[in-house]
Amino acid sequence: MEENEFFGEKTFQRYCAEFIKHSQQIGDGWEWRTSKEALELPLDDFEVTESTATNEVIKYEYHVLYSCSYQVPVLYFRASFLDGRPLALKDIWEGVHECYKTRLLQGPWDTISQQEHPILGQPFFVLHPCKTNEFMTPVLKNSRKINRNVNYITSWLSLVGPVVGLHLPLSYAGAASQDE
Amino acid sequence: MTDDKDVLRDVWFGRIPTCFTLYQDEITEREAEPYYLLLPRVSYLTLVTDKVKKHFQKVMRQEDISEIWFEYEGTPLKWHYPIGLLFDLLASSSALPWNITVHFKSFPEKDLLHCPSKDAVEAHFMSCVKEADALKHKSQVINEMQKKDHKQLWMGLQNVVSTWSSQEIETTQRVKQDRFDQFWAINRKLMEYPAEENGFRYIPFRIYQTTTERPFIQKLFRPVAADGQLHTLGDLLREVCPSALAPEDGEKKNQVMIHGIEPMLETPLQWLSEHLSYPDNFLHISIIPQPTD
């Protein structure tokens, strides 16, 4: 097992379990699901309703999956209006804050694209996972330096989530450093 | 080895005779004739159906046309799956030609990804190539390549055209050979592995069945066992999809199909990965019910 930030599925499951524990404590709705055919790609699911400037209510659904190819977590999400109409990629882009847009437009590997959900088989939007290791490495290195315990999932989600409208309550950070 | 190179060529040039018919509820100004095409197994629907689109749009009004999508016997066809995979999985037990229905309305948002342009196909294709190399080489080979090498892979694939007559096949023979060479000049690097190993780190594969909810099975699987023995196709199935195989004394219930053929289960997985992968560097394996005739 390498010293750096690739991690295996069991570790992913462990961090998710800790994450879910805190989620249940504060009641913000994350759930752990396993596919009945295999345990390999469990997912969490979180629904959030947000109002946009045009007074339309949009429902977002976020799933965290494990990619065995890249050995990192991946964020899948989709959004729809309350009548069920899905948001298109261009609508999603409109919701991304300016400060993230430049970075995302830099290359095909950094961007949001439509992909097939590997368990549900339905179209979702995804942040490409191949750069995850690159931005997680400094985060984890620094935590080790100051001897601080870190939940990979919490740190990762707090970095990628805001790009696509998902904001974790700060209490997750406190929970992460308490778990031994 | 000459024989092995022939396999690469046979895979690359595989074709499926297809008949495209316009959906009956589409609004047309004149009757729409069906359109026949030989589809390349290794390419993608939205890449090779420009002629189909043009043919049907000739008899329709602009306002009745939105994003094109394809369906076979009620199942929307995922353009991001290679054509050969779609055929093997859904239609290989039926008589040829493959009958596909063409739609220009009511895009099935819940089932299909949008394909706004050829760039979307390129992005998807390169994403698969990249993921395959993450499995085979921890992304080292693909990352060492220059952008122009990535482009060359895509250009080689993009020019695998649909044809519709044997005449057209003959006249474009030399062009097609160039595309094959163009593609493999780069792809061969993705098929290499260190001398001290006996194969890739993990094998890029996906196993598809229509009988399950889940679209495909993909897991980490090494081509070589701890004792140095090469894992076979049978070993892979026993490990990740045992229901695909017949029980010891039982009857064979399923076909395990890649590129329209059933490789022997004793075939080394490493060899299959090097020779029967699609251009995206994945082995796309279909498990289908054994035909009863």
Image (spheres, coloured by chain):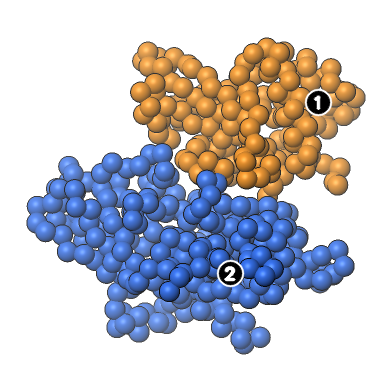
For the point 61% across and 86% down, the residue is: B3
Q: Are marks 1 and 2 on the same chain?
A: no
Point 63% across, 30% down: residue? A44
Residue A161 rendering spot, x and y as whole percentages:
61, 26
Display colour for chain B: blue
**In the orientation shown, which residue stands out farthest toward the bottom?**
B2
Tell me, for residue A165, which label it has, or none. none
Q: Which type of secondary structure does the marked residue at label 2 adopt?
A: loop
Whether A173 is drawn above or below B272: the answer is: above
Which residue is tagged 2? Answer: B252
Say what amino acid the circle numbered 2 marks: Lys
CB of mark 1 within 8 Å of CB of mark 2? no
For label 1, the SS is loop
Question: Considering depth in this image, is B156 or B212 the residue closer to the camera?
Answer: B212
Identified by mark 1, the residue type is Val
| Direction from residue A119 to residue A49 in the image, left or right | left
Residue lying at the far left of the rendered structure: B30
Task: Specify whether B276 is left or right of A16.
Answer: left
Residue identified by numbered label 1: A150
